Amino acid sequence: MNEVTLEEWTSHYHETEEMEQLFCAQSDALKRTHQSGYYVSDFNLSQVLVREENRKKYVLFKNVERLPKGEEEFYRHKNVKTECFQEVGIYCSMLSDMNVSFTPSFLKENFDRFSPFIPEAEFAFYKKVFVYDAMIYLCDYVKKSREKELTQLENQLKEESGGRSFNKSTPQGRASTQEDKEMLQNGVENSSQSAFVYTFVLPFVVFSLSLLIPIFAWVFGTLS
């Protein structure tokens, strides 16, 4: 088991995907803290622990306190905004830059300017929290997004595997459909031709043979 503070963790370079995983774990830890009746009283990077077990990350908060009665929603919402502000600051490497006045109000007023630094998949989430003052956990947002993607993928697979209407939308599907039409048309034509042979031609042949048999019989009789 490896455990460091968030301050130590951010002092090293990490891929964006790894940061996304960590922030999702932090959001899950915050949600569990709230569900237990507590809130995080100090989000300082030195007061947040990052633990890694079997390549999976966990986050622990050193300082938590009981949610004040009647003000639970206020403190939950405040925690979510503070956590998100911290995460955006880490993405943009702004928390350690003392020359820039990086504050929640500044971020809210200039949020779109930070889009190049925030992963595209999470940009809408952070914007909802800061610009539209939404109360939502990152872990829930990511989960719902994945479920939506999974549903879309399942629907697409169903259409590809069983829907002729889907096949028609592709060049191969249209070619296949045209081929089916031509085969059906040829089958109808062949059936019509066979019906004509049996209905008209065959009786004529039988009638002709019935006339020729007596003639053949007379010719062979005279020869013998």
Image: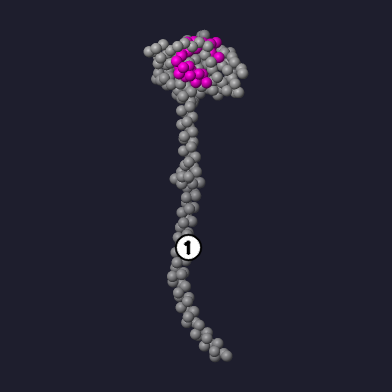
**Residue 82 placement (x, y as % from top left):** 46, 14
User: What residue sits 46% from the left and 69% below the top?
Assistant: 197
* Closer to the camera in the image, 218 or 117: 218
Q: Residue 66 occupies which quadrant of the picture?
A: top left
Q: Can you name the residue that lies furthest to the top here?
A: 98
Q: How many marks?
A: 1
Q: Secondary structure at mark 1?
A: helix
User: What residue sits 54% from the left and 22% below the top?
Assistant: 21
User: What residue sits 40% from the left and 16% below the top?
Assistant: 73
Q: Quadrant of the N terminus?
A: top right
Q: Amino acid at mark 1?
A: Asn
Q: Quadrant of the C terminus?
A: bottom right
**Residue 51 placement (x, y as % from top left):** 58, 17
Q: Can you name the residue that lies furthest to the right here?
A: 1
Q: Is residue 108 visible?
A: no
* Closer to the camera in the image, 74 or 7: 74
Q: Which residues are magenta?
A: 25-49
**Residue 211 placement (x, y as % from top left):** 47, 82
Q: Is residue 59 visible?
A: yes
**Residue 173 placement (x, y as % from top left):** 49, 46
User: What residue sits 59% from the left and 21% below the top?
Assistant: 53
* Magenta stretch contains residue 203: no
Residue labelled with disc 1: 190
Q: How is the image coloured?
A: one colour
Q: Is residue 28 above or below residue 62?
A: below
* Magenta stretch contains residue 31: yes
Around disc 1, counting alpha carbons within 10 Å, would you say few (fewer than 14), some (14 to 19), or many (20 or more)? few
